[in-house]
Amino acid sequence: MSEKTLAMSTPNAAPGTALAVANPWAVMPPLGNLDAYISAVNRLPMLTLEEEQAFARKFRKDDDLEAAGKLVLSHLRLVVAVSRKYLGYGLPHGDLIQEGNIGLMKAVKRFDPDQGVRLVSYALHWIRAEIHEYILKNWRMVKVATTKAQRKLFFNLRSMKQAIKADHALIDAGAHRDSLSEAEVDAVASELQVKRADVVEMETRLAGRDLVLDPAPADDGSESFGPIAYLADASHEPTAVIEARQRDALATDGVAGALATLDERSRHIVEERWLKVNDDGSGGMTLHELAEVYGVSAERIRQIEAAAMKKMRKALAEYA
């Protein structure tokens, strides 16, 4: 049986699900009132060891969904208690409870009463694992913990940091600092058995604030400026790539072809005027210098140049 099937048969498998089984299991309040849900969960009766084992065996042998539902209902308060420890990540409490409830249902499905372990101990791992997975996927757009060691560091660094600061508050003059000292970094690394560099990196990443890449317009109608304005890379945008290739082709093959349509004198004048750069960065020959070379007036050189440029523009337009 899947967790989805168990959820459909279980009263309030997640906050907001109003399904009922036989008394004394009451209908749970809707998600809109989280306080009422938590209050109702805390009023649900706990199962004795004998009841727990009886329901678990009935579920395993007969696939009795009502027995599974009673196992889940009696441990919903455990999910609420565990989820409270993860409120510091800024995620909705109701969502944390919902993910924890999914973990609880997975535990109920796999629970073996003959192993000599109470369901509360067995389910604790599954509840935490489901909440951890949800936090890692939703707390940041960019994942901050991928390896097993990083995940361990992610979920312990915040609480250890607070404990260290509290212990040193009375004797450490720098206790007001947000970052860990060198000695404190070493202590955390030793306690969690991770690399010192990993502690420093994780602390830096956790301390960073989230930024909206593309902020919404301000209420006064003014444009907002976000990181997307300077992080966007337009150089690889398909249209920009095609345009760049076309410009490169015009600047090489196109210009060479256009020059080939000119007579020798016109081509020489255009090259000297527009395509040559001296070592000092200055341009080519002036109209008067070219006039002396060809024994004509500067005005005549200008006319030849204008006619040549007109012919080249026509040739470039045909090439494009």
Image (cartoon, grey):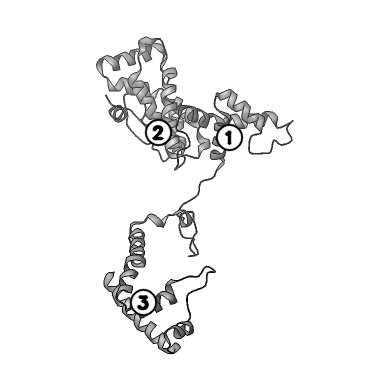
CB under 8 Å between discs 1 and 2: no
- Horizontally, residue 272 falls left or right of residue 207, namely left
Mark 2 or mark 3, whichever is nearer to me: 3
Instruction: Report crowding for label 2: few under 14, some 14 to 19, many 20 or more residues within 10 A (C-alpha).
Output: many
Q: Which residue is mark 1?
A: 200
Q: What x and y, as percent, mark residue 52? A: 37, 15
Give whichever of 40, 138 is nearer the camera.
138
- The amino acid pointed to by label 2 is Gln
- Horizontally, residue 155 falls left or right of residue 316, namely right
Q: Is residue 218 above or below residue 256?
A: above
Secondary structure of residue under mark 1: helix
- Horizontally, residue 261 falls left or right of residue 271, namely left
Let me know if residue 24 appears in the view.
no
Q: Is residue 30 above or below residue 62?
A: below
Query: Where is residue 238, by image quadrant?
Result: bottom left
Give whichever of 305, 144 is nearer the camera.
305
Measure the alpha-carbon separation of dots 2 and 3: 78 Å
CB under 8 Å between discs 3 and 1: no
Q: Which residue is mark 3?
A: 267
Q: What x and y, as percent, mark residue 124? A: 44, 22
Mark 1 or mark 2, whichever is nearer to me: 1
Pointer 1 or 2: first along the chain: 2
- The amino acid pointed to by label 3 is Arg
Q: Which residue is mark 2?
A: 98
Give whichever of 318, 144 is nearer the camera.
318
Let me know if residue 68 appears in the view.
yes
Q: What x and y, as percent, mark residue 289? A: 48, 82
Q: Is residue 51 above or below residue 26?
A: above
Secondary structure of residue under mark 3: helix
- The amino acid pointed to by label 1 is Val
Q: What x and y, as percent, mark residue 173? A: 74, 35
